[in-house]
């Protein structure tokens, strides 16, 4: 099944950032988008994940053209089907890591999965306040929070920026297994080519174009 399809996207801020960008994401598929800093990777991910409207082009999610959906229908897709793991974490700072996960679990009628916490190595610090955690721990809590709601599509922007190599590899493995087990798909943005090439398909954003390189 087709999870996401983007057709002829272009985006312009003060200048044209990219044009004619098309891609498709299927169940159990992982796509990486690489490119230099400032090439527009995060902007493209924001467009694909419905946070930003492209200057031109179409994005369909689970078969629905998102431009044609009502506000309510789009909010429901965002809440239930899209999982965003972004450069800034958006955790609720005054609360514990566990409370942050609880909110996600309650909103999506899911349970907090102990094995997930163990694999992300946050079982030990789960009752600490978010502000007392290291950057890498906060990053792993935000990953746990996203996976707790069981989204169909993961949008991931530089997920391992604060992590050492071993933890980064474990996080990537977790994402891949999550997609297989839940028939989900992942679009990952990174400038780390090694990480990118762990994905099934790799695209490069360069000279305003998106080109498939794997
Ligand atoms: N809200 C905005 N308004 C105007 N220009 C913006 C906005 N967001 C990003 N840009 C510009 O678009 C360009 C691409 O930014 P973007 O964040 O998409 O790049 P990136 O490829 O993700 O870079 P990095 O690897 O450093 O994260 C940048 O030059 C930036 O200045
Ligand atoms: Mg970026």
Image: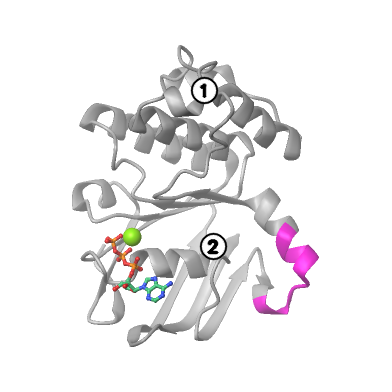
Relative to 26, is 42 on the left or the right?
A: left
Image-quadrant location for residue 208: bottom left
Locate the C terminus and report the quarter of the image it occupies.
bottom left
- Give residue 49's mark: 2
**Image spot of residue 96 (x, y percent):** 56, 23
Q: Main secondary structure of the magenta part?
A: helix
Identify whether 143 is placed above or below 125. below
First along the sequence among labels 2 and 1: 2
- Which one is in front in this view, the residue at disc 2 or the one at disc 1? 1
Disc 1, ligand 2: is the CB inside 8 Å? no
Crowd tier of the residue under label 2, counting other residues whose Cα lies within 10 Å: few below 14, some 14–19, many 20 or above: many
Identify whether 3 is placed above or below 171. below
Foreground: 52 or 213? 52
Foreground: 50 or 186? 50
Foreground: 84 or 29? 84
Relative to 43, is 101 on the left or the right?
A: right
Q: Tell me whether the residue at label 2 lies in contact with that at label 1, contact meaning CB atoms closer than 8 angstroms.
A: no
Magenta span covers which residues? Answer: 67-75
* Residue topped by disc 1: 129
Foreground: 129 or 97? 129
- Between the C-alphas of marks 2 and 1, the distance is 29 Å
Image-quadrant location for residue 168: top left
Can residue 74 be found in the magenta stretch?
A: yes
- Give residue 9's mark: none
Residue at 46 percent across and 35 percent down: it is: 177
Identify whether 118 is placed above or below 189. above
Crowd tier of the residue under label 1, counting other residues whose Cα lies within 10 Å: few below 14, some 14–19, many 20 or above: some
Can residue 184 be found in the magenta stretch?
A: no
């Amino acid at each position: 099944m087709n999870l996401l399809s983007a057709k002829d996207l272009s985006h312009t801020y003060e200048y044209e950032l990219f044009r004619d960008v098309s891609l498709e994401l299927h169940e159990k598929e992982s796509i990486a988008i690489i490119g230099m800093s400032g090439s527009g990777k995060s902007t493209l991910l924001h467009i694909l994940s419905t946070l930003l409207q492209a200057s031109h082009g179409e994005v369909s999610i689970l078969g629905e053209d998102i431009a044609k959906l009502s506000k309510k229908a789009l909010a429901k897709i965002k809440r239930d089907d899209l999982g965003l793991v972004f450069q800034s974490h958006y955790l609720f700072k005054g609360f514990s890591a566990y409370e942050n996960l609880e909110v996600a679990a309650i909103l999506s009628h899911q349970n907090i999965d102990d094995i997930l916490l163990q694999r992300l190595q946050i079982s030990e610090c789960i009752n600490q306040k978010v502000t007392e955690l290291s950057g890498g721990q906060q990053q792993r809590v935000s990953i746990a929070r996203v996976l707790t709601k069981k989204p169909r599509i993961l949008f991931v922007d530089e997920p391992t920026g604060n992590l050492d190599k071993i933890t980064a590899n474990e996080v990537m493995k977790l994402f891949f297994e999550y997609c297989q087990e839940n028939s989900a798909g992942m679009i990952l943005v990174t400038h780390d080519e090694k990480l990118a090439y762990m994905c099934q398909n790799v695209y490069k954003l360069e000279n305003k174009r998106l080109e498939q390189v794997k």
